[in-house]
Image (cartoon, rainbow, N blue to C red):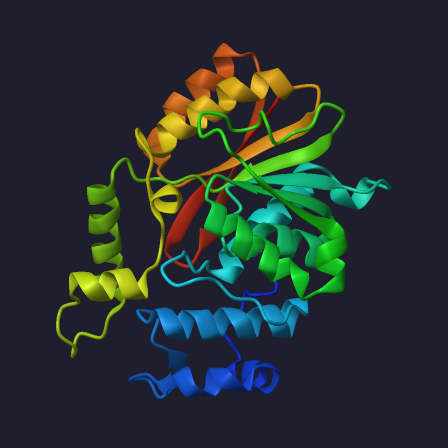
Amino acid sequence: MHPRNLHHNSYDFKELIKSYPQLNNFVIQNKYNLETIDFSSYESILALNKALLLHYYKVANWNIPANYLCPPIPGRADYIHYIADLINYEKSEKQIKGLDIGVGANCIYPILGTQIYNWQMVGADINENAVLSATNNIKTNEKLRSHITIRHQKNHANIFEGIIDKNEYYDFTMCNPPFHSSKEAASKGTLRKLINLHNSDKPRPTKKEIVLNFGGQANELWCNGGEALFIKRMIKQSSSFKNQVGWFTSLVSKKENLPKIYKQLDKLNTTRQTFLMEQGSKKSRLVAWKF
């Protein structure tokens, strides 16, 4: 993890429970007699996230609707810290402003950007329910209300157009794109993840359990062409806003997609950087470019 990430060590459940007592209902003992939660349980992960946000980031009453993605807080914080390095945040004396493409119902990146670095953030999404939920998540906190704006992207063909206003400037944009290419592929990926996490003493998870335990709407999990085509489209559209954005960035889940992405970036004569992000056994990449 990034050196400034607060989540390098194992979860201190005793301290987290002090901040969010409801988490105690989900803490169990593993076979090594250590405290943990059932990471294949949606309710457990949701409770853990609420505890982490309250304990470390002073955010209370955060919530998401049923069947929407419940993000891993440590990994999301990593993205924020790497962006801070990218834009030389520590050397900047001005107010930083960022745009999260696909903010989701959880609104997690704008929340972390505001609470960790005091950034001004705009979050955009094509899903009206996600926009409503994200808006509700910032209403309960005065600082979040003053630092975060949520916008609805009504044209699904556009990524930046209709969101970035004519006279606006952003120090960065960020995106965690849907990485599956179809609903079927997303379901298979979720099934693999759930099987890897579930207790071997329990029966194999059913399709219903998959939906309940690993939320995610279609626009969160998959799009035609998967993440490679989405990012290539984002790169192409970013050229129209090159004077209004300092750095464009995106997560890339599959390393085999990097050559296609680099080819598109080089075609448009961009300056690019890539950061490897690791959280345990999970590896991802942050690709950044500017004109």
* Residue 165 found in image quarter: top right
Q: Residue at x 43, y 44 (%)?
A: 284
Q: Residue at x 74, y 39 (%)?
A: 88
Q: Residue at x 60, y 54 (%)?
A: 135
Say if 269 sits above or below 209 in the image: above
How far from the left and from the top, in percent, is residue 41? 33, 71
How far from the left and from the top, in percent, is residue 261? 42, 24
Asked whether residue 89 is in view, the answer is yes
How far from the left and from the top, in percent, is residue 185? 22, 43
How far from the left and from the top, in percent, is residue 170? 70, 33
* Residue 205 found in image quarter: bottom left
**Residue placed farthest to the left in the image?**
203
How many numbered marks are there? 0
Say if 11 sits above or below 272 in the image: below
Using residue 144 as the reference point, say whether residue 127 is left or right of it. Answer: left
User: In the depicted view, which residue is nearer to us: 116 or 238?
Assistant: 238
Q: Quadrant where the C terminus lies?
A: top right
Say if 291 sits above or below 143 in the image: above
Say if 15 sits above or below 226 in the image: below
Q: Residue at x 30, y 66 (%)?
A: 213
**Residue placed farthest to the right in the image?**
93
Using residue 90 as the reference point, say whether residue 238 is left or right of it. Answer: left
User: In the depicted view, which residue is nearer to us: 126 or 229?
Assistant: 126
User: In the depicted view, which residue is nearer to us: 189 or 241?
Assistant: 241
Asked whether residue 107 is in view, the answer is no
Using residue 20 as the reference point, say whether residue 171 is left or right of it. Answer: right
